[in-house]
Image (spheres, rainbow, N blue to C red):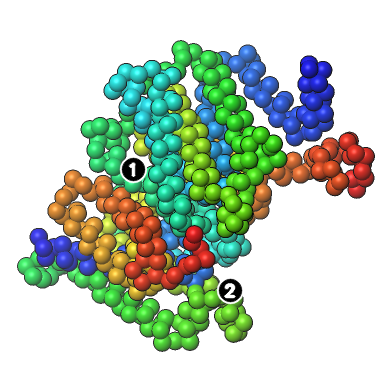
């Protein structure tokens, strides 16, 4: 039991980490709460399903194509809808939620709300600590670690990463230092959408696809990001694994409380916002608080 | 006395096209049951009345006081479930359960207000978004008491005929909207709440520095907003004869915001106009159920991008002009102000 919790928790936490880091990045850089974030995750999953089922493309190239397409959709969403209202927090929340509903409805129109399953990248399983772990789960975990290391390297080692962090700290001063802020926002948005798409692509074969699959991860990553501190990438990473383990333990140890797992995460979020609004590693936001 | 009222009526209502339009609209609405007895039309109008209260209460809380609430359905749902359970389990009649449901929503409003005392902007929106989802999780866990996915059904009716239902909902709507309009009227000489709500939205620290106990007024805004949203929720439960999880749905909160933004935020009449246009439109679109939600979301995006001030405000600005000297509204074709004779152009 404990081993199963450990392994499933790692996989679940990794997926949440991918989603939460993108969400946190775009909040930190642009101060936007993008409620359409997890809909890219859904779009990527459905992309894989369509490409493998209807076009007969093998799973791994299909994942790559779907990743590129979803990132492009994310960029188009940003350019068309979010960019011109990005100064107004509430309008951004409203419009991203409307966009998420649009995607949900389009998926519902095309795929009719059936429960679907995408084919796995690799079949078979391995024995770890006496638990059967499918290669798909191992692959998921490997991709997650690889991508997370990549994001960390990008943010801390490259000129682009420094520019992104500078915009996150103070976009006006960054602008004065010759950083093209709107381009950085565009790049950050595509990184965020791309991370969300990666999460969707690698987890798709182990999930049931349905048009409402974006809501539960959205609730979870909001709680995760608040726990870790809004805008802090390290905090989101740790928060994601905390919530991944908590969720998996609840599902394994007390299945009758499974409906409460989202509610529990949200209670944690509210409590943290009330008593330690900057989260575990958050950026202080004095001017945004009373 | 009567003559003065008549004169006021001529000066303040007939002369301003926006108010005249509103008057004509409400009189026409009152006469609808005489023209048609079609249950479908009456039902749509009853729910439009109820949702008008709901949207206006969101406007009072979020548009005027600036506490942007993304979980307004919490108040609606709490009141709906409270009155439904009281009605079914305790056998209380609707005239008792509706006020108690609304009071339960006030309690919910005060609870939500506690984080609002510490948080602002997107943080407050995130927290308010969470509350109805938490309650939904609880409802789905304790299915024995709450009915889970299917809700609580079989409530007693408010009255025996649809026409009476319509007039009751219409009367409740008029009284509630009137009260909220008076509470948020910044020019009012009777209550100060209007101007204080505006002050809290514009700059809370300055409002505090001016000696306003902002905590008290935020509590008041949440309590009043919760109360009227609760009235709407309790009536909705009794007219539908069911209280279900859809009353707490994220989508319902979202709709309240959209109706208000569509009609015109921070203008009590805006949400009313928004509901009476959008709600029947959405009902009508049930003929094409597949793309109904898509059209709704599309309308939302278009309004937010191109008409952020709202349709009612947009039309009013086309029809009326404000006198630069005495700030009185005038019809668009006048060249001089009707009161002070100042040149309008």
Instruction: Give residue A182's mark.
Output: 2
Q: Position of residue B249 (x, y in %)?
A: 41, 42
Q: Nearer the viewer, mark 1 or mark 2?
A: 1
Going 44% across and 31% down the picture, which residue do you hit?
Answer: B102
Which residue is denoted by mark 1 in the rendering?
A: B135
Q: Position of residue A219 (x, y in %)?
A: 36, 55
Element under label 1?
A: helix
Q: Chain of mark 2?
A: A
Q: Nearer the viewer, residue B225 or A68?
A: B225
Name the quarter where the N terminus of chain A is drawn. bottom left
Q: Position of residue A160 (x, y in %)?
A: 48, 83
Examine the rendering and report whether any part of residue B21 can be seen: yes
Q: Residue furthest left?
A: A130
Local packing at callout 2 (Cα closer than 10 Å; few below 14, some 14-19, many 20+) is some
Going 48% across and 87% down the picture, which residue do you hit?
Answer: A159
Examine the rendering and report whether any part of residue B269 can be seen: no
């Amino acid at each position: 039991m404990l081993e199963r919790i450990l392994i499933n928790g790692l996989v679940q936490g990794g997926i949440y980490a991918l989603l939460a880091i993108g969400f946190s990045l775009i909040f930190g850089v642009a101060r936007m709460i993008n409620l359409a974030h997890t809909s890219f995750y859904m779009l990527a999953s459905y992309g894989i399903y369509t490409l493998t089922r209807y076009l007969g493309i093998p799973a791994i190239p299909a994942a790559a194509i779907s990743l590129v397409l979803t990132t492009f959709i994310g960029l188009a969403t940003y350019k068309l809808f979010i960019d011109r209202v990005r100064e107004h927090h509430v309008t951004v929340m409203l419009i991203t939620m409307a966009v998420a509903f649009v995607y949900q409805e389009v998926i519902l129109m095309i795929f009719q709300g059936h429960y679907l399953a995408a084919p796995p990248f690799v079949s078979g399983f391995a024995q770890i600590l006496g638990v059967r772990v499918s290669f798909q789960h191992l692959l998921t975990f490997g991709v997650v670690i690889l991508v997370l290391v990549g994001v960390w390297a990008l943010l801390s080692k490259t000129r682009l990463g420094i520019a992104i962090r500078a915009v996150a700290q103070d976009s006006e001063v960054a602008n004065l230092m010759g950083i093209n802020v709107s381009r950085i926002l565009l790049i950050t948005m595509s990184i965020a959408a791309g991370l969300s798409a990666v999460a969707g692509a690698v987890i798709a074969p182990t999930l049931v696809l349905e048009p409402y699959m974006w809501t539960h991860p959205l609730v979870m990553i909001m709680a995760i990001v608040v726990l870790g501190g809004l805008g802090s990438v390290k905090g989101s990473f740790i928060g994601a694994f905390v919530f991944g383990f908590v969720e998996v333990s609840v599902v394994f140890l007390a299945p009758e409380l499974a409906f409460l797992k989202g509610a529990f995460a949200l209670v944690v979020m509210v409590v943290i916002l009330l008593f330690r609004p900057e989260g575990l590693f958050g950026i202080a936001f004095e001017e945004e608080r009373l | 006395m009567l003559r003065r009222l008549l004169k006021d009526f001529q000066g303040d209502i007939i002369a301003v096209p926006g108010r005249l339009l509103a008057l004509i609209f409400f009189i026409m609405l009152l006469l609808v049951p005489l023209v048609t007895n079609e249950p479908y039309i009456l039902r749509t109008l009853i729910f439009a009345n109820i949702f008008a209260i709901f949207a206006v209460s969101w406007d009072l809380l979020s548009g005027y006081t600036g506490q942007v609430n993304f979980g307004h359905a919490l108040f609606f749902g709490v009141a709906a479930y409270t009155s439904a359970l009281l009605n079914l389990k305790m056998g209380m009649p609707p005239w008792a359960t509706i006020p108690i449901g609304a009071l339960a929503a006030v309690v919910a409003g005060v609870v939500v207000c506690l984080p609002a005392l510490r948080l602002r902007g997107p943080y407050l929106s995130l927290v308010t978004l969470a509350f109805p989802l938490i309650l939904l999780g609880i409802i789905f866990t304790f299915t024995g008491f709450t009915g889970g996915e299917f809700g609580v059904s079989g409530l007693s009716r408010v009255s025996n005929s649809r026409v009476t239902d319509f007039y009751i909902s219409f009367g409740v709507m008029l009284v509630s909207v009137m009260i909220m309009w008076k509470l948020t009227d910044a020019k009012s000489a009777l209550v100060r709440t209007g101007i204080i709500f505006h002050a809290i939205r514009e700059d809370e620290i300055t409002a505090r520095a001016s000696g306003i106990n902002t905590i008290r007024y935020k509590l008041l805004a949440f309590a009043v907003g919760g109360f009227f949203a609760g009235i709407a929720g309790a009536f909705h439960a009794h007219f539908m004869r069911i209280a279900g999880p859809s009353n707490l749905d994220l989508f319902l909160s979202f709709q309240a915001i959209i109706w208000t933004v569509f009609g015109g935020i921070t203008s009590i009449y805006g949400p009313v106009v928004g509901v009476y246009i959008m709600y029947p439109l959405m009902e009508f679109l049930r003929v094409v159920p597949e793309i109904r939600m898509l059209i709704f979301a599309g309308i939302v995006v278009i309004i937010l991008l191109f008409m952020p001030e709202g349709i009612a405000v947009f039309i009013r600005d086309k029809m009326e002009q404000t006198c630069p000297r005495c700030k009185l509204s005038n019809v668009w074709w006048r060249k001089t102000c009707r009161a002070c004779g100042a040149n309008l152009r």
